[in-house]
Image (tube, helix red, strand yellow):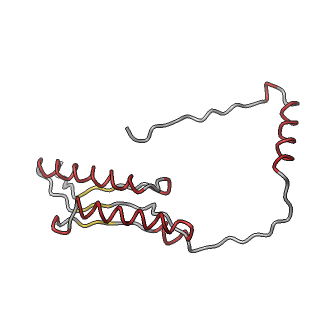
Amino acid sequence: MGLEVVGLSFHFGCAYKHPEIWANTIAECRTVFDIAEEIGFHMKILDIGGGFPGGVRKMNRFHEVCLTIRTELERHFPESSGVDVIGEPGQFFVTSAYTLATKVVGKRRREEINRRRHASRRHASPSRTRVHQRKQVQLHP
């Protein structure tokens, strides 16, 4: 086909905040780079994507993730490897770029809401009651 494989890219999105996920994936990328080299591909790009935790409340988590990424990149892709690393920190910057302010005009106690909800369910006909099941999906083996 005449294609040139130049690197790998992964992106966790905002769902994954645990640093070890980045550590494991960077190590797996090293394995893929090594296999590619064995079969004749000289990859030089690693895109670690984005999804970095942002905002004031998640600053400690952001620092943990960055420290883990730096440590794993130094271990598996040192500067001497010649691999260019791309990060996409958009979420990190944008999360703290806005604040929402709103006026509370009324509130209810939780017990009151639950009582109303249970009362309305007692009068619901079985044919109109819907049951939704959540499916558990395994994203990674």
- Residue at image point 63% right, 32% down: 133
Q: Residue furthest bottom?
A: 97
Numbered-mark total? 0
- Residue at image coords 26%, 52%: 29
x then y, percent, for residue 71: 30, 63
Q: Position of residue 107 (x, y in %)?
A: 84, 58
Which image quarter: residue 68?
bottom left
Q: Is residue 114 left or right of residue 58?
A: right
Q: Is residue 112 left or right of residue 75?
A: right
Q: Quadrant of the C terminus?
A: top left
Task: Report x, y in % for residue 112.
Answer: 87, 47
Looking at the picture, does residue 69 appear above or below residue 56? Answer: above
Q: Which is more toward the observer, 41 or 136?
A: 136
Q: Residue at x 49, y 37 (%)?
A: 137
- Foreground of the two, 91 or 119: 119
- Rendered residue at 57%/67% (across/down): 57
